[in-house]
Image (cartoon, rainbow, N blue to C red):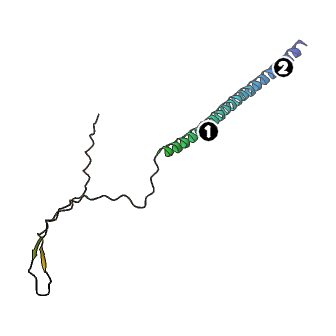
Amino acid sequence: MARSEIEELRARRAQLEEETKSLKKKQKKLEDGVQILEERISIEELEKQHNALRKTVSKLETQKNDLESKLKPKPVETKKPPKQTKIKKVVNKPKKKIHSVPKVGNGITITATVDQPLQKHKAVKTSRKQPDKKKRFFF
């Protein structure tokens, strides 16, 4: 009886060792599964935070652009742009010399005016001076 009992105990021991191995494999698979699920959960939480931050940033950017557009002066609606005015020199015309001719028989007096030739003046155009070249420093 001792031998059969020893054999039963050895068989029981082998069976328990196999179950232990299978349980350890199952435990390892479950631990790996738990780690994977934990990683997925942390990734989902980070994605939620990321999306919330992205939405907040986009709202702030639109708010900033709206405020900047309010600060910029609105262009006055004009149909025509202002024209550049030309500066003209006013030239005093020389006085006309009047020559009178003695009366002709009907009582009509004939007068002739002699103009001195006008001096030709070039029209002065308003030209903008070229802006001074910007000084650029290279560091």
Residue at numbered disc 2: 12
Disc 1 secondary structure class:
helix
Foreground of the two, 21 or 124:
124
* Cα gap from disc 2 to disc 1, whole angstroms: 57 Å
> In this image, 19 relative to 76: left or right?
right
Q: Quadrant of residue 5?
A: top right
Number of numbered markers: 2
Q: Position of residue 38 (x, y in %)?
A: 68, 30
Q: Amino acid at mark 1?
A: Asn
State yes or no: discs 2 and 1 in contact (Cβ < 8 Å): no
Q: Is residue 7 above or below residue 63?
A: above
Q: Position of residue 60 (x, y in %)?
A: 56, 39
> In this image, 103 relative to 25: left or right?
left
Residue at numbered disc 1: 51
Q: Is residue 69 above or below residue 97?
A: above
Q: Position of residue 16 (x, y in %)?
A: 81, 21
